[in-house]
């Protein structure tokens, strides 16, 4: 069984479009995250979310919005895509908030043309 | 917020030699320091972690050391093998954990045969 799964794995779209990436974890973790990995391999946190609180990295444009229908899912919606949004987006989950192992999904490679 | 610096960005060693990667962090409240390995095209995976109440931890060929006073921690890989070739990331939790993990910029480890 896949612990953290993301869909789609690859996404190619035009500038200005809106897209979503879905994430599900079956580990029973209480905290989920979205990380962005750019072409230089830098891993940067975008959001962390548990069923109590959403913490947003202040550098993330408000075109990005996380949506959590329940504890096991944290989807990422992106409006008005820009060229600079091209990256690999990783969903992750953990027990607690930054105090235990992060389990990453396989990543979703987004290419904006 | 937390700032994690990682050096070197690229490290090339002969097979069988040792490799050392160093990181520093800024938030004195940080108490969890994991190391992740990311192979090409794959997700980051935890290889070892250390908490602030411990100075050193070892798992077979991999060891991590932590100096809380100096705010730095290091990854040591002995008897390197070709399968150790990957990008390695250090990380530290920030805000005592509430802000998730902040990652270093990664070290590309190359094992020369």
Image (tube, grey):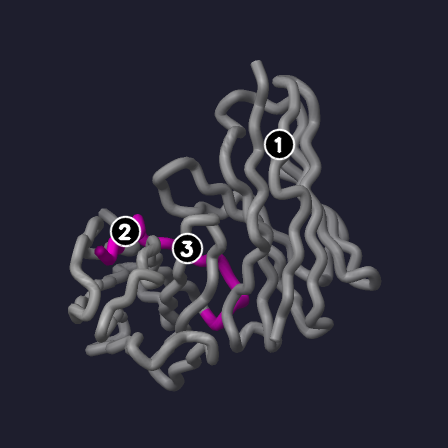
Question: Which residue does the image show at 73% across and 56% down from the upper left?
Answer: B54
Query: Could one spot residue A73 in this view of the protein?
Result: no
Against A73, residue A2 (above or below) is: above
Report which residue position mark 2 lands on. A109
Residue B99 image offset from top left, x and y in percent: 52, 75
Q: Which of pointers 3 and 1 indicates the residue nearer the eye? A: 3
As drawn, the label of residue B31 is none
Residue A36 inside the magenta-drawn segment? no
The main secondary structure of the magenta stretch is: loop
Instruction: Tell me how far mark 2 sits from mark 1, CA to CA.
Output: 34 Å
Name the residue at the right extreme: B69
Residue A100 inside the magenta-drawn segment? yes
As drawn, the label of residue B60 is 1
B64, A29: nearer the viewer: B64
N-terminal label among 3 and 2: 3
Report which residue position mark 3 lands on. A37
Q: Is residue B53 left or right of residue A23?
A: right
The span picked out in magenta is A96-113
């Amino acid at each position: 069984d896949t612990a953290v799964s993301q869909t789609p794995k690859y996404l190619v779209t035009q500038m200005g479009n809106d897209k979503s990436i879905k994430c599900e974890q079956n580990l029973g973790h209480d905290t989920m995250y979205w990380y962005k990995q750019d072409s230089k391999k830098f891993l940067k946190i975008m959001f962390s979310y548990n069923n109590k609180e959403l913490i947003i990295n202040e550098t993330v444009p408000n075109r990005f919005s996380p949506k959590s229908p329940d504890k096991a899912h944290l989807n990422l919606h992106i409006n008005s895509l820009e060229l600079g949004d091209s990256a690999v987006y990783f969903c992750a989950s953990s027990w607690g908030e930054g105090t235990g192992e992060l389990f990453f999904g396989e990543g979703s490679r987004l290419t904006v043309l | 917020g937390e700032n994690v610096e990682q050096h070197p960005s690229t490290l090339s060693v002969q097979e069988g030699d040792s490799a050392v990667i160093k990181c520093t962090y800024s938030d004195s409240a940080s108490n969890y320091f994991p190391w992740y390995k990311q192979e090409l095209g794959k997700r980051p995976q935890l290889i070892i972690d250390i908490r602030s109440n411990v100075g050193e931890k070892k798992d077979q060929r991999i060891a991590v050391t932590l100096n809380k006073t100096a705010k730095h921690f290091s990854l040591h890989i002995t008897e390197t093998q070709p399968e150790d070739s990957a990008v390695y990331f250090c990380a530290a939790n920030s805000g005592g954990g509430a802000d998730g993990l902040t990652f270093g910029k990664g070290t590309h480890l190359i094992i020369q045969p």
